[in-house]
Image (spheres, coloured by chain):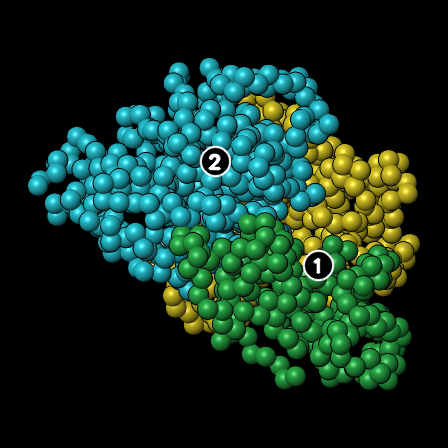
Amino acid sequence: MTIQFNDETFREDYSFHNSERAIKRFPFPFDNDSYMYAVNMEQHRGGPPDSVYEKRFDVDEHYVSEMRDRAMVLADDPLRCQSLPHMTLAGWDLLELIMVSKSEDYPDLFELHRDGDQWHWINKPLGIDDRFTFMDETTLPYGPMEYITRQAQGDFCVLDQRDDNLWMDAGTVTTQADWSLDFDIGMNFFEWHAPVPLAHEKGIFVRALKFLLNIQQGAPARRLNWTLTVNPLLDTSPENYHKWGVQKTTLTPENIGSKQHLRVELQTFFRLPRSNALVFPIRCYLCSFQDLMTAPKWGRRLHRVIRDLPDELATYKGFIDNRPMMLDYLSKFDDGLPTSNGIWPELDTEPPLQK
Amino acid sequence: MSGAEKIAVRVTEKAALNDLVTRFRFEPVAGGLLPTFSGGAHTVVEMRDGEITRLNPYSLMSDPFDQTAYTISVRRDDAGRGGSLFMHNQVNVGDEMVISNPVNLFSLDLRARKHLMIAGGIGITPFLAQIKQLDRAHGNWELHYACRSEALGSYVDYLTATHPNDVNVYYDDQDQAIDLENLLDGQPLGTHIYVCGPKGMIDWVRGKAAELGWPREAVHYEEFLAPKPGKPFEVKLAVSNKVIQVGEQESLLEAIERAGVDAPYLCRGGACGMCETRVIDYAGNFIHRDHWLEDEEHSSGEKIMPCVSRFEGKTLVLDR
Amino acid sequence: MSKFEFPPSIRSRPVYGTLEARPGKHHLMIADAEGAEAIMDVATPDMMSKTHIIFISGGTDYADKLRALKPAQFYEGPTYAAAVTRIRRVLQDAHMGLQVYLTGTEGLMGQAQFEAMQAGIPHTAIQTEHRGSVARRMQCVHCKGITEDVETDPFVCAHCGLNLFVRDHYSRRLAAYQGVCIDAEDPGNVPEPKGIYE
């Protein structure tokens, strides 16, 4: 599979752009016209060909540029990647999982050759060719989790499983929707989700935790989460919020189509074998409003979801102030026609915009 | 899908260690490597005994880093429901079987500064894998192993030969007993206790640790809860619209499966919560044997764990 | 000072209890200021004979009253920073079964709890009871500096000077609440500070 990698930025001049293919495969998260929290887990066992769900760790046209952005974030702030001492074994589990998955799923881009514990890893898009001894950190330039997550898109939270709970004891977090690994590291599942409004009362997290505790080797799961971001900025961290927060006020009716992005997290959950830990990759996909509107069903649906979202959620997701301007824009793409259930764009069957 | 992923294996070794315990070695039918695992994990072995299919969990005792084969040890229980007898009497080298991917409900706390292991009888098995894992990482562990007699002391020779300073063995028939109070007194902060053996031993260790002020989170235990036989009883499955009879030698879960109803399960030993089933109606008494539900849930009459628990009375209607 | 009623809040916000005697060969009690009163409330002669009290007076004069309880060991220090090396030394050679009791301000309890956790005691086994000041330790999420004794919302980060609002999101590891820039989206628009619990 040949992928044409973009040369783009996720900051400053924001040259990020989605090709037509990227827009078509964008993981639109809403399967009907209103949104409320749900556990919404399903098995992560492939998906339609060329969809973001097909491979264990999806690699797309943004791969090289995203990894460059990650390297910049980590150079500025090493605290975005931390691993408590007991989590090194889980880091090796994760390194193996990603190397095996990528070399099997994208053999043209990644190669893994193993001779006992002597491993040889080739990452063609990033120009990496390394030999190392599995389980011996002195043979890698970074700890195993940092080493491999510098080569994989999305954030990674590595969760220790103890006392019928999950503990965020390691992670690489540079593309997060506004939470701090440095602050949250060491917290359990309920604690790191504490700031999420409404969900605790609905028992969402109790059910989700029970499901996650029982995820077994070879049977990963996945779900989608979403928020909105002004500009295709990957690093929307609280650490830098005092710098990027003001960008939210730069939206105008003229630029909202190109600047306002839907930000979707494809969250997956894999059991790690040697450590019995759980890895929680959070893969971030961005798409501008104007690109989303090219799918009529998405145009209709996004307007309705944003319009009817409870205030607490819109506040928590950080767009309450811009909501009126968004609705002005989105309403132009909602002709009131019914939409089919499901997240797919259905470009062949959904009628074009009637206005 | 219920249970963990399945692996097709062939039995490549069957060795009687002593009068009660036999070791089995499994290698993958398809060749290649078996999944690695964390010490303390078990595999669920499928046994097709004529019309009856049993699924029994057994701790993996082999080295987690050895992916060429898994080994388990099975203690024969003549009064049990037949799983161990099937393994001892009907399974032979060359037989093909189906086992599950490893599942770990008894994992090490990798933050521990010291792992204090207390084993009774066949409870030694998970520790064998954990010791190998810890040795690779130069971990700090100490084992106290109570056996009925020297003849029945499975793996004692291997353990004392390879780790003479860290293994302590106690033979019941020589009146040797673990001096638990002294053992628990004076352990450094950051010590975790792991106990695996008969229920009485587990209760004893947990009780003594609590009495001496040990935090609950520092005491880990795994009990091999085989579903106990019991009086037959009738159950109505409301969703599948079936009435089933639970036989004396089968568990409620097995009876539900025998009726062709796909009920979720994982560990089949009352510990993981997967098979939790809602009770719609009942007139009678529950015999709860699980470690999953809280006391209030046990007395509420609203839930049951069908893998190990039973019922006696006129009516039981389940949400299955 | 009477006990403060913390309003119900999010799941990461610590909830403090009331100290009670627990079985154990040794007891370690660490308190600051009015926390001494909680120790006095739970002390019995039998317990005190096995107890080491570490008291940070912080300008109060409970020390004599605590000495009068006849604990097996007693230390009075002026500040937490002065006491922390002693706390670490005591924990270094302690054994499982040690009961730990923390009482006083959130800052004292949080920091001492972290030391006990690092030594190998699960945090859920450590008892806490709040007494005295409700001022908070706040970590600035931007510069990572911790500002002590914060009582108003918003407040100014003592390290980088940003105006921060006070969150209830709390980290045991840092023993601090999170402070986030309040005027990022509208620079200069900083509301009048009010008491955190007003």
At 63% from the left and 84% from the top, the residue drawn is: C2
Horizontal side of B171 relative to A328 (left or right) equals: right
Q: Is residue B205 above or below residue A299?
A: below
Q: From the top left corner, tell me how far across and down residue B100 is, in percent.
A: 55, 37
Task: Name the quadrant of the C terminus of chain B.
Answer: bottom left
- Rounded to the nearest angstrom, the CA distance separating label 2 from label 1 is 31 Å
Q: Position of residue B214 (x, y in %)?
A: 76, 63
Element assignment for label 1: helix
In the depicted view, which residue is nearer to us: A262 or B133? A262
> How many residues crowd mark 1 within 10 Å: few (<14), some (14–19), many (20+)?
some
**Residue C192 vs residue B146, the one in the foreground:** C192
Q: Find numbered disc 2 in the image and state the secondary structure of the residue it sits on.
A: loop
| The hue in which chain A appears in the rendered picture of the protein | cyan
Which residue is disc 1 drawn over? C114
Task: Name the colour assigned to chain C in the rendering.
Answer: green
Which residue in the protein does label 2 denote?
A: A154
Q: Label 2: how many residues lie within 10 Å, few (<14), some (14-19) or many (20+)?
A: many
Question: What is the x, y in percent for residue A311?
Answer: 32, 60
Q: Is residue B310 above or below residue B196?
A: below
In terms of image quadrants, where is residue B295?
A: bottom right
Residue B188, disc: none
